[in-house]
Structure formats: structure tokens, C-alpha cells
Amino acid sequence: MKTIYKYPLSLVDRQDLSLPRGAEILDVQLQCGQLCLWAIVDTDAKFRSDYVVRIEGTGQGPIPFDHRSSLLRRTIQQRGMVWHVFVMVEGK
């Protein structure tokens, strides 16, 4: 069965997520001040895939990863700061 799940994120440089294989990343946004990722997932999936969420602040220096390989890119603003969120499949 496919359904939409929400995954709370932390505002850190890198975090790893394990989602059901075949998950479709929909969006990353702030909800009531909490950074969240939404994905369509197959709740019957027997295997999982690893994803990496990278967050970079505007003007913080060189990006330490290949941003072109990201599945999703979003820009969010919180507490006067601008953050750029990249979601990638682990190992790519």
C-alpha cells in the first residue's frame, strides 16, 4: 500500500534516512518551525534504501558534495537564515 509519510529532520550539515525502497521524495518544508521531509512510500516494501540529506547555509563556503546528484533541492528560511536542502541517494 502506498501512503505519504512525514519524516522530521534536524538542521544539521548531514543526516541519513532509511526509507522503504522506491520511496518518492515529495518535498522538504518547515511545518510549525520543524523541518520535515514528505515522501510517498510503499508500506509493504521488504527492502529499504538509504538517503542523505545535506543542508548548507548561504555563504558558508564551498559545497563539500556533488549537488548535481540530488533528487530534490529546496531553499528554506528560518530565524533570519537561508538554508539549502539537498536530498540524495546514499553512494551517489
Image (cartoon, helix red, strand yellow):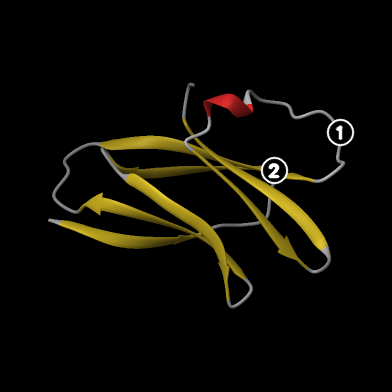
Q: Is label 1 or label 2 in front?
A: 1
Figure check: 88 above or below 27: above
Q: Which residue is located at x 59 percent, y 69 percent? A: 34
Q: Which residue is located at x 82 percent, y 46 percent? A: 58
Q: Which mark is residue 13?
A: 2
Query: Pointers 1 and 2 in contact (CB under 8 A)?
Result: no
- Which comes before the other along the chain, label 1 or label 2? 2
Q: CA distance from mark 1 to mark 2?
A: 13 Å
The spot of residue 36 in percent (x, y) is 52, 62
Residue, disc 1: 61
Figure check: 54 above or below 4: above
**Element type where label 1 sits in the image:** loop
Residue neighbourhood size for the residue with mark 2, other residues' Cα within 10 Å, grouped as few (<14), some (14–19), many (≥20): few
72 vs 13, left or right, is: left
Q: Amino acid at mark 1?
A: Gly
Figure check: 72 above or below 65: below
Q: Which mark is residue 15?
A: none
**Element type where label 2 sits in the image:** loop
Q: Nearer the viewer, residue 80 or 51?
A: 80
The spot of residue 21 in percent (x, y) is 26, 38
15 vs 81, left or right, is: left
Total labels: the figure holds 2
Image-quadrant location for residue 59: top right
Q: Amino acid at mark 2?
A: Asp
Image-quadrant location for residue 82: bottom right
Q: Which residue is located at x 86 percent, y 33 percent? A: 61
The spot of residue 29 in percent (x, y) is 55, 62
Q: Quadrant of the N terminus?
A: bottom left
The spot of residue 88 in percent (x, y) is 50, 34
Q: Which residue is located at x 29 percent, y 53 percent? A: 40
